[in-house]
């Protein structure tokens, strides 16, 4: 039976395949897409992706059913958590100006299987986002015509009584998705122009809502007689925050569009900052005026803003809001249909998804196959699924992507930059002629072990530390960590940090309600997991990170990404068990696709070298750190041209 068990070497090789990272091209500005988008184009894409059904639908749904008027606080917390994630996306989008968003960022820093699972979930996120917005668009248009479309469909087509499915098939939502798919296939410039038109109308409507809303505001609607400001308490606020994340998922369209930006190093960070700031302000202010205009418990979840104006006697204003909201939702549809095929393209281009989706139309320079196929799938989702079930499922995919992007920022920041490693010369050997007084980037080779021992007394306080190496100030206390490769300890610490965050948030969410822990064990576990989180954070901080890059960098690393990680995990655990069940099923389907297709067709799999005979040489970098360099040996018994053979070298020595 033992012969059927895999050998340790085979398991090691298999794990290395799962965690291999993407090799980036030297010229990352080269692309088959059309680099035609400016900072304004990207900013309006981001605003269009965020300000839509979240503003016109979710504000009323969360206020009435989850948080009450405290939906304002839910949007503030969701906006803060999104800001932490957005800064991570901004750094990656500037440093890696390639399409793929969270998938690409995870692939270049964490590993292949994790990147595939993130990309797989992002695909579902965009499909659900587009379908949910299409249903909201249909509901608003139906409200303008006094629900005649709904009544006609229920009478002549029928209704369903199936969990998670809509009460009736929404043909109007499916139709608008098909029309939007046709426009997106014409190219990035056409999509951007349409987005500009709809965004301008949407911002005009929002300005009207704020002015009229504050004129009609009644502070008594927040009083105790109407249930108070936070009728569902802190738990309702946090549950509302998890749902409100749907409102901010649109900013990653900017990162997904970085391969079509003219100057992504500057445009992507600016566009993310501008769009997220404007969207967050709009959500907070609209939530204020909505809950002040009418009592929160009387809101209509399907069309809260339009209904509020109708009930205050301003029918014309309600009609204007409903019409403007449709324009806003059009921008979200364009945003989702714009991003989704590009992420599919990135996965297919890397060999992890079916190659047919990597085809780019030569004239429009867009992935037409992906646009058409996933536009049809999105229309099918909008036809049969319920909006609330779709939104709940959307939040978990978004939060998971944010978590992995934040972890990827930490890993990448403490890795050596491309070009920091010593470049090999002809024959695969470093130059045998070291110069006097080595400078940065220069190698000195030591052939004997006695030479290696002479390095011990070197003054380490004057060394130039590479990213991922232990800081000189901590070496006397953490000397045992100096034997690891640069970045290795940081990677282990990031994993420990994430495990500690999961355990800590699990105790916070389930400790009193589901686990029924006694007070002493609840407090003890909180202290232990908090210490694990903080110690992991300190261990990461004790290592050198990359400095002085020319692109945008998120401040306070590793603190900012760590806060994003723990907040995202907490919000994920606040989602319902059915959401997790559906998420687990989708992950299992993704694993079947990866192990059935992706792992075998991955381009990184084709780049893996065959087995070679190796020998070890000690190489000392200018910083004084010692590494063991593995070099390929000439397979032929004859020495390579221009290089002496080993016997000749021995005689010289």
Image (tube, helix red, strand yellow):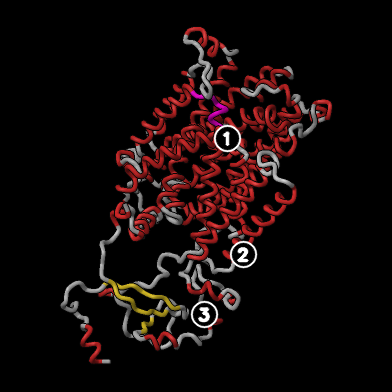
Mark 3 or 1 closer to N-term?
Answer: 3
636 sits left or right of 354 in the view: left
According to the image, label 2 marks what residue? 538
Q: CA distance from mark 3 to mark 1?
A: 53 Å
Residue extent of the magenta highlight: 385-392
Query: Where's residue 457, x and y in %?
Result: 51, 87
Q: Which residue occupies the foreground of this view, 644 or 312? A: 644
Q: Find residue 577 and name its label.
A: 1
Q: Residue furthest top?
A: 155
CB contact under 8 Å: marks 2 and 1: no
Is residue 584 shown to the viewer in this render?
Answer: yes
Q: Which residue occupies the foreground of this view, 609 or 355? A: 609
Mark 2 or 1 closer to N-term?
Answer: 2
User: In which quarter of the view is residue 48 placed?
Assistant: top right
State whether the magenta stretch is mostly helix, strand or loop.
helix
At label 3, counting other C-alpha atoms closer than 10 Å, the crowd grade (few under 14, some 14-19, many 20 or more) is few
Q: Is residue 75 above or below residue 457?
A: above
Query: Where's residue 584, x and y in %?
Result: 49, 38
Q: Identify the element where label 1 is drawn.
A: helix
Is residue 48 shown to the viewer in this render?
Answer: no
User: In which quarter of the view is residue 188 placed?
Assistant: top left
384 sits left or right of 310 in the view: left
At x 52%, y 40%, the residue is 397
According to the image, label 3 marks what residue? 463
- Label tally: 3
């Amino acid at each position: 039976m033992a012969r059927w068990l895999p050998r340790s070497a085979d398991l090691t090789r298999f794990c290395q395949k799962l965690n291999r990272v993407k090799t980036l091209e030297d010229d990352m500005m080269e692309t088959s897409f059309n680099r035609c988008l400016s900072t304004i184009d990207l900013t309006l894409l981001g605003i269009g992706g965020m300000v839509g059904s979240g503003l016109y639908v979710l504000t009323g749904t969360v206020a009435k059913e989850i948080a009450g008027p405290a939906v304002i606080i839910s949007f503030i917390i969701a906006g803060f958590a999104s800001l932490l994630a957005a800064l991570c996306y901004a750094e990656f989008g500037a440093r890696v100006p390639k399409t793929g968003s969270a998938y690409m960022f995870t692939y270049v820093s964490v590993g292949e299987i994790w990147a595939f699972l993130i990309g797989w979930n992002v695909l579902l996120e965009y499909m659900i986002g587009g379908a949910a917005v299409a249903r909201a668009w249909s509901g608003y248009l139906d409200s303008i015509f006094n629900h005649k479309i709904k009544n006609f469909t229920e009478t002549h087509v029928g209704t369903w009584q199936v969990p998670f499915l809509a009460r009736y098939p929404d043909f109007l939502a499916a139709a608008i998705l098909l029309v939007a798919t046709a426009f997106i296939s014409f190219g990035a410039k056409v999509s951007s122009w349409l987005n500009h038109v709809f965004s301008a109308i949407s911002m005009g409507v929002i300005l009207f809502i704020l002015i009229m809303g504050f004129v009609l505001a009644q502070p008594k609607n927040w009083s105790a007689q109407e249930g108070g400001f936070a009728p569902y308490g802190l738990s309702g606020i946090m549950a509302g925050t998890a749902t409100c994340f749907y409102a901010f998922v649109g900013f990653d369209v900017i990162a997904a569009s970085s391969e079509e930006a003219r100057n992504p190093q500057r445009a992507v960070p600016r566009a993310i900052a501008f769009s997220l700031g404007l969207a967050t302000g709009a959500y907070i202010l609209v939530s204020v005026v909505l809950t002040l205009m009418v009592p929160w418990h009387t809101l209509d979840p399907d069309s809260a803003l339009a209904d509020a104006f109708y009930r205050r006697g301003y029918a014309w204003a309600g009609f204007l809001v409903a019409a403007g909201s449709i324009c806003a939702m059009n921008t979200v549809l364009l945003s989702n249909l714009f991003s989704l095929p590009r992420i599919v393209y990135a996965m297919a281009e890397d060999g992890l998804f079916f190659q047919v989706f990597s085809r780019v139309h030569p004239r429009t320079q867009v992935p037409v196959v992906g646009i058409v196929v996933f536009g049809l799938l999105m229309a099918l989702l909008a036809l049969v699924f319920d909006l609330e079930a779709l939104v709940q499922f959307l939040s978990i995919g978004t939060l998971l992507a944010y978590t992995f992007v934040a972890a990827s920022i930490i890993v990448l920041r403490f890795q050596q930059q491309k070009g920091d490693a010593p470049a090999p010369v002809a024959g695969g050997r470093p130059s045998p002629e070291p110069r006097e007084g080595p400078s940065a980037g220069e190698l000195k080779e030591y052939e004997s072990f006695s030479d290696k021992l002479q390095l011990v007394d070197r003054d380490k306080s004057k060394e130039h530390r590479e990213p991922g190496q232990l800081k000189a100030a901590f070496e006397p206390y953490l000397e045992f960590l100096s034997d690891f490769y640069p970045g290795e300890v940081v990677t282990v610490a990031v994993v420990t940090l994430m495990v500690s965050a999961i355990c800590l948030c699990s105790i916070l969410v389930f400790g009193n309600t589901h686990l029924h822990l006694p007070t002493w064990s609840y407090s003890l576990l909180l202290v232990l997991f908090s210490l694990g989180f903080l110690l992991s954070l300190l261990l990461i901080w004790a290592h050198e990170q990359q400095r002085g890059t020319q692109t945008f960098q998120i401040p306070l690393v590793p603190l900012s990404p760590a806060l994003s990680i723990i907040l995202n995990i907490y919000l994920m655990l606040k989602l319902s068990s059915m959401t997790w069940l559906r998420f687990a099923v989708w992950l299992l389907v993704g694993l079947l696709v990866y192990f059935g297709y992706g792992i075998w067709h991955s381009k990184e799999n084709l780049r893996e070298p065959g087995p070679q005979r190796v020998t070890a040489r000690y190489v000392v970098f200018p910083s004084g750190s010692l590494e063991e360099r593995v070099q390929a040996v000439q397979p032929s018994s004859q020495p390579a041209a221009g290089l002496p053979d080993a016997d000749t070298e021995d005689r010289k020595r």
